[in-house]
Image: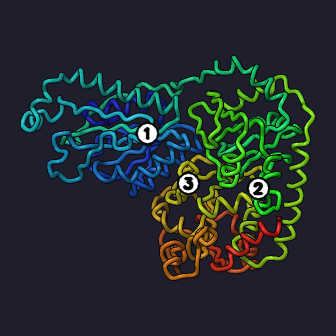
Amino acid sequence: MKQSNIPSAIAVVSACQARGIKNIVISPGSRNAPLTISFTENPFFNCFSIVDERCAAFFALGMALQQQNPVAVVCTSGSALLNYYPAIAEAFYSTIPLVVISADRPPYKIDVGDGQTIRQDHVFHRHIGYSANLKLDVSHAKERIERYAPHLLEQQQKEIENYNASEVNEALHVVLDKQLPVHINVPFEEPLYDTQNVGEAYQNPNDGIQSNDSVLNDIKKYRDLWNSSKKKMVLVGVNHPNAIEKEQLAVLANDLSVLVFTETTSNLHHQNCFQSIDSIIFPIEKSKNTDEQFKDLQPDILLTFGGLVVSKKIKAFLRTYTPKHHWHVDEVKAYDTYFSLSHHFKTNTSAFLEALLLDNKTVNSTYFDKWNSVKNSYEAKRSRYLEEIPFTDFSVFHQVLNSIPNTYQVHLANSSTVRYAQLFDINPSLKLFCNRGTSGIDGSTSTAIGASIYENEPTLLITGDLSFFYDSNALWNSYVKKNFRIILINNSGGGIFRILPGAEDSENFSTFFETRHGMNAEHLCKQYGFEYESAKDEIRLKEKLLDFYLNSEQPKVLEVFTPRELNDKILLGYFDFIS
């Protein structure tokens, strides 16, 4: 087996193997050759080649999200590294273990006018779990170092190797223990392509950190408070499928003093859960006794877990009608989203719920019954509304979500896509994902493709036109599986801006906010080897969906064209109708 003969490259690759980090996403370059050679020549690693670094980072993020294990991305020096930043920010706020490994120029070639050089050390310092900035090996290319930076030779190679090993190990400790992205920056001097033969390196895939649940030792006082409260709200953000035991959810959902608010990305399903938060809150805002109803909804205890929440309505409500107690459960961090955080339980959610519900007592309460009747009312009205409206985004999302076969992995793009999805019931067998850490549209397609690599079931991406075209380089790789599907809802621009304050029918609005366009995906599909179909009305969509999920020799895109100027009116009309 071959590997680079540069000690720092050996240290990084050996440490990844020792920690069981098998999946490596590499973008082409010369400066990262020592890393590329060492990773690709080692049969322990599964290596993927993605040219566009922004796409590569989201591809790796999707894989790490689906696998719930660290994935590494490797790039050359210079601006290539900066293209990782959107995915790093998403990984930071979504707590996804991403290992960023960048090759760098020697320190004496930074800021002297050399090509492909920027200040790479600590470049992500505000959105990274740890930055490991390795030192340049002085045993490699020693003649160049003597000529350009002889002061570097004052430190012995053994000292440098010890320092580099310590930094790499600390970075990998953070990514495994905290599930946060880390950055390892490795300077290399030429020559870059020399190799040496070695045997198989040591590996320990189970070298992780066990969580400490000692924080639950003092839970009795919280359990007593929980059992005595008559108004408790459980609000669940982004949550991995099967992260919570069904029995635990059932105890919460069947408690008449508890409202369990979930979203599509919560991946939690029970008939007593409230799955469309905005359908509860929007009508209250339109009512004549808004304050009275919001006080009825206001919880004494707010229990939150999972990642970030989609609904802006629930955030606004809880920030105004704050709970007496807000408890958040997460092993790493707790955001004070509602400006009322009173306790952070640093443990996994299942362990917390097991301790909280150990001696669960029921209390006389009308909390659930009151709001469940509201839910039943809007669900009946929603069914009637769907029978009355024309072909628009609203009806398309309803039709599409009902069409998805059981057990699919489904990725939702951001902006309109994920928000429309909140308005409808979701098949409990589906596994739902969305990049809600930063809520950007920039890498939805790349993330979905990365997440599909090790998923046994087919993967479906539901996306809007701006998100799809923005990330079109995501299709530029050889790893898209035959059972990968994209439903592209094309409303000729950023339709969500038409429902926001300030929307108006003017040339400036349509150009700079809505970004109106006349593009379609047909030629992109031909270029990248996707089957392409389109639909412009309800009958055609129904026909196309019948064949869309069948086995094929190529991945597929179904592009659905909806009326740009009618979509916002139908969506806003829905909230009027249920109110």
What's the amino acid at mark 2?
Ile
In the rendered structure, which disc, 2 or 3, sits on the residue that comes first in sequence?
2
Q: Which of the 4 quarters of the picture holds residue 10?
A: top left
Measure the alpha-carbon separation of dots 2 and 3. 22 Å
Q: Position of residue 376 (x, y in %)?
A: 89, 56
- Amino acid carrying label 3: it is Ser
Q: Quadrant of the C terminus?
A: bottom right
Disc 3, SS:
loop
Name which quarter of the figure residue 393 lies in.
bottom right
Q: Which residue lies under the disc numbered 2? A: 281
Name the colour scheme. Answer: rainbow
Q: Depth-wise, is mark 2 or mark 3 nearer the camera?
A: 2
| Residue identifier under label 3 | 439
Name the residue beneath numbered marker 1: 128
* Nearer the observer, 454 or 179: 179
Most foreground residue, 312 or 169: 312
Q: Are marks 3 and 1 in contact (CB under 8 Å)?
A: no
Q: Is residue 239 left or right of residue 385?
A: left
Pointers 2 and 3 in contact (C-beta within 8 Å): no
Q: Nearer the viewer, residue 316 or 89?
A: 316
Residue 214 in the image: x percent, y percent?
A: 64, 18
| Left or right position of 403 against 173 | right
Q: Which circle marks residue 394 in the picture?
A: none
Q: CA distance from mark 3 to mark 1?
A: 18 Å
What residue is at 84 percent from the left and 28 percent from the top? 228
Name the kind of residue labelled 1 in the image. Ile
Among numbered discs 2 and 1, the one appearing first in the sequence: 1
Mark 3 surroundings within 10 Å by alpha-carbon count, few (fewer than 14), some (14 through 19), many (20 or more) = some
Q: Secondary structure at mark 2?
A: helix
State yes or no: discs 2 and 1 in contact (Cβ < 8 Å): no
Q: Residue at x 70, y 46 (%)?
A: 318
Q: Tell me if residue 250 can be seen.
A: no
